Image: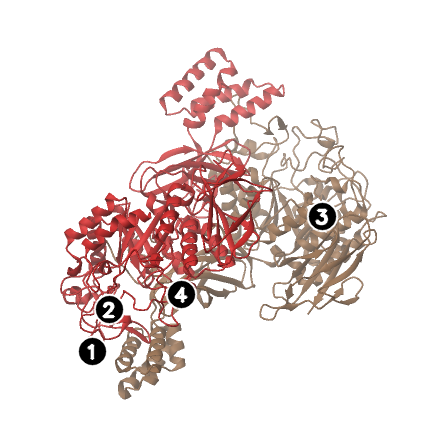
Chain colours: A red, B brown
Amino acid sequence: MGLLDSKQALESSPGDPTGPRFHIEDIFPCVDSGRYAVKRIAGEIVDVWADIFRDGHDVLAAALIWRREADATWRREPMQLHGNDRWHGRFVPPEPGRYLFAVEAWTDQFSTWRKEFKLKRSAGQDVTLEAREGYDLLLQLLPSDAAARHLADTAGRRYAAELDADVLLDDRLAEAMTAHGARQDLTVSLSLPLVADRERARASAWYEMVPRSQSRVAGEHGTFRDCIERVPEIAELGFDVLYLTPINPVGRINRKGKNNAVKAQPGDVGSFYAIGNEHGGHDAIEPQLGTLDDFRDLVSACHRHDMEIALDIAIQCAPDHPWLKQHPEWFKHRPDGTIRYAENPPKKYEDIVNPDFYCDDRIGLWTALRDVFLFWVGNGVRIFRVDNPHTKPFPFWEWLIREVQTRDPGVIFLAEAFTRPKVMKGLAKLGFTQSYTYFTWRTHKAEIEAYLAELTGYPERDYYRPNFFVTTPDILPVQLQDGDPWLFKARAALALASSSNYGIYNGFELIEHEPLPGREEYINSEKYEIRTRDWDKPGNIKDYLKRLNGIRRANPALLQTANFSFLQTNDPNVTGFLKQSVGGDNAVACAIALTGTPKEFWLHFGDLTIGPENDRRPVRAVENLVTGERHLLEWNGLRVRIEPGRDPTLFFRCEV
Amino acid sequence: MGLLDSKQALESSPGDPTGPRFHIEDIFPCVDSGRYAVKRIAGEIVDVWADIFRDGHDVLAAALIWRREADATWRREPMQLHGNDRWHGRFVPPEPGRYLFAVEAWTDQFSTWRKEFKLKRSAGQDVTLEAREGYDLLLQLLPSDAAARHLADTAGRRYAAELDADVLLDDRLAEAMTAHGARQDLTVSLSLPLVADRERARASAWYEMVPRSQSRVAGEHGTFRDCIERVPEIAELGFDVLYLTPINPVGRINRKGKNNAVKAQPGDVGSFYAIGNEHGGHDAIEPQLGTLDDFRDLVSACHRHDMEIALDIAIQCAPDHPWLKQHPEWFKHRPDGTIRYAENPPKKYEDIVNPDFYCDDRIGLWTALRDVFLFWVGNGVRIFRVDNPHTKPFPFWEWLIREVQTRDPGVIFLAEAFTRPKVMKGLAKLGFTQSYTYFTWRTHKAEIEAYLAELTGYPERDYYRPNFFVTTPDILPVQLQDGDPWLFKARAALALASSSNYGIYNGFELIEHEPLPGREEYINSEKYEIRTRDWDKPGNIKDYLKRLNGIRRANPALLQTANFSFLQTNDPNVTGFLKQSVGGDNAVACAIALTGTPKEFWLHFGDLTIGPENDRRPVRAVENLVTGERHLLEWNGLRVRIEPGRDPTLFFRCEV
């Protein structure tokens, strides 16, 4: 039986008599007991809470400690007791990166002595001996900090000379001893990981486009130059992420034809998800798009318009990807020596093969895949949309994201996983910065509200950053297949207003809506062919999207997802909610029609309050962000009207 | 960068590429991420749930593994998928003790092959190569289990000879390969601790008595012989734990007088919480009570009546406790050389001093305190009520309880802590088998129901076993100070029916109710003087208690606390609930009046169902456990009447 040292970590085994004096429990924020990092934004306050207690009635003190994962030195912030043994502290991670934080608690012996001394003296007890004990304690706990030590030395000398207990009760001395005196029973919690991302991780508006479809000449393969021409227009619409489907050379072996035909016809361009041919693989560019220099020019053009490129990375290889010859050991061979196509039996994907992540040369393969990301980072890309991450090993992603972010903590990873809920959440936990969602299929009020409640509630809000796409090249949801312009507007508004990360896929603004019959997919999908569009086609909703994005940018409440409250509406086909900015200085109420008929209804604010945390008040008035009209609330609500044909949404800035 | 081995523990660092293939999350049951043990009863089923998933679409398999903490070998139980990636398994800890359990998951490669093979063959694809792959897999995953290996060998030989794929698809082969084939991607969760207690930890009815007050001769110091005389009567009342206040020699120095007077008068017996005098300390017996042999006789008398002794251990010393002379180093000395009395400034407890748990000879002190418990265990005591554990260090208790239970896992510790909620819960987590509660002060319907919801809900029910005392020598709650017999009956019934561990303090059955004016304490408390009572005093409620305890013993539903559901009553002064036995074979509905006026009301069962988990049905009829009357439910409810003056409770056995 070995016994105790005063500084102990909670890691000690249960039942070990060297265990810590304090219980430090239920630390917030925390994902899966600290197995995964909490997500926050650099420069923003991180509030930390913990239950802290020990035996007896001594005065306790606690601190929040934090550091960058790579640093050796902890910083310390005081914690305050808020009641019921729950303590609070806060810190601000100054820049993007990985952090650790933990909670320290100790017995504040000098304050304990001081409190008891005062109680006894007030009760008229003889406290001569107690004064001497305070003096002894002062010497025993002598602070290391110079100023505090000076205070303690001075008080000690004066007490020794005058035996006047009052010099030991000085308020400044008490503060100095609490902050800097030797810390008895020091207990340190497990340290918890936190990732601080840059602001665009919290708020981003994505415009997805297929580079080869950007030529203005019908049937001609688009180039990066064509893309560059479109940048001002897309920036003008208010988007800040220009997301390109894969730009790599497209495989020729088993190339798919139009509408996913098994055999390509001469001139067919193939699926851009069949990565690689004789021109190179994941770090090469399809020659018809242009050169690496052209790509860099596109990156620069975006930067000039405060936009960023997001690249689509699909870890799969066309049969003519160079790796199949250079590294046959990275692929699983069948008994006849061939490499297996990707498949989801009985479906086969003959134009791609998957690497074997657990092949004998795992180190080589994983490193090469990491280097693909680093190659594009080196060429100005700091956002990656990762295709189907749920079909690759989780430890691979956890390792890769860490490897990349160690070199550039500003790199953002969006997980394109449409799979089971726990798998999608698992990917977010292990490190994906943003995640695709089921938003596309949430159309009725009850299912929209249940899903928003899930994503903006705990624990999801601490690790899962939704990115609401209204459509994707793979998904044309049933409700948009009629091509009702009001519904396209409503879906974009709902995505943008509820999630601060959202996106559209090009063509959405043109109300493209023709499906493969019976499927939730586009007919003549540009995944398999070149499309040429008139980007100013009559009936487009570009002005509407521009107005929405303008409201979004002007209202910080819409630039975050989690500070979310539902508003009551007495119409089953209108959803209403209120969002507040991180600092509480901006609040926006939204009401969005879910069916096309005109509606007149009450929008009720209930007992919601807005404003900074120390001064929260009920909403008293609102300003319509489109018309500029101002309304006072009546009975905590507003009587309002929506005519979806004109505009399916209402946006109000709230005032107290 | 070191890479992966197929067998990996989840303990590996985040981001480490040697991380496990599977996510095993949200394991139930689990207290504070496994820092503390889940509490269960030996011989009863432990249901274990976990979220288990990996990348891709392979067939998964999972097992629950468990062992006694002291054993080296894990046992393995299969787990089944219940949907939404949640898996279930169960095990039964055969005897009291500490256990560990964990979850294993692996890729079932042979089943994956089999599933895909069948899909492809059904789709008419050529599967010649696939069959060969299945054969190769069979050889690669060859099971170690003899019977399974025989099946695999046979199938392999037949396939090699006949090239008939069907021999690889045999159901028995599939089962054998799943259960015993080599397990790819094996991932093992952290192991979680569990304590299995004996049955009396789950269900116990305590009768607390002060041994020195058990003489039938007025003013005479009671003895163990007097206690033995009372055993048949108390057993007849239906109690199964006879809890004795401290039986150690009572200190003489600064002995307290009657009603806690600072100075004792000649003949005063002092507080039995001032432990120790010249006759010995915590392992000695107050000579006026008798000898150790007498005590052993009392233990035996109890056993003959299926009762057990619970001893009260108070870790504090009278100034004449032998340890002050033998081990002055175990106590903190003041600057003048004296030892500080226990105090809670400005209050002083001059008749006791506390040991210094962190003195230089901590090992000696802690060991001596442990040996006090072991001494009494050696003399037949297996239940301890620990006085004020919250004023002694938590690591001490965690260590001590483990030390004692390692020697006898049947030892039960009840924490007598009336303090802040998280401290009380903290003590339960670190190892106390049962805990005192706020029950005494929960009197109105809303507060009773909120408290029962908290204690029977998660996570509390997994570690906190309430013991509801209606009164204690320290607590005569306000509501009982009027001495209404119906209310004494109602409180006992409420304690007994809601908590399977409950207790009364002697005198309760005699409706003793005279308080110190303005306090929730008894006047002339026998903590400071000898009381002599007529145990058959007119007006006593012994017959009522006997009936209650009889109902309790006959209905397993009342012998556990957690399987608890509220029943709706349309009277704000009646609380109703339904309890079910662990196996589901017994269900009891209770309604208890909280005020004294007659009541007629509906008792509604809503959509509750009863019965074993695979055959749960609505309640259709009930039998009154007092009158034997049987009633069919109407509209899922009963119209009933309570006349508190006659009986403030209704107990019904429920039928489907």
Say which quarter of the image contains residue A76. top left
Q: Front-most of B53 and A537?
A: A537
Q: Front-most of A160 and B55?
A: B55
* Residue B301 visible in the shown view: no
Name the residue type under label 2: Val
Q: Which residue is mark 2?
A: A353
Among numbered discs 1 and 4, the one appearing first in the sequence:
1
Q: Are marks 2 and 3 on the same chain?
A: no
Can you give x and y, in whole percent of width and height, for residue A194 in the image? Answer: 37, 45
Q: Which residue is mark 3?
A: B504
**Dot 1: what SS?**
loop
Foreground mark, 1 or 2, reads 2
Q: Which residue is mark 4?
A: A481
Name the residue type under label 3: Ile
Q: Chain of mark 3?
A: B
Task: Classify mark 2: residues with Cα within 10 Å, few (<14), some (14-19) or many (20+).
Answer: many
Name the residue type under label 1: Asp
CA–CA distance between discs 1 and 2?
A: 16 Å
Foreground mark, 1 or 4, reads 4
Please determine whether, in this image, residue B179 is positioned above or below residue B450: below
Q: Which residue is mark 1?
A: A336
Please determine whether, in this image, residue A476 is positioned above or below residue A27: below
Can you give x and y, in whole percent of width and height, for residue B179 in the image? Answer: 40, 72
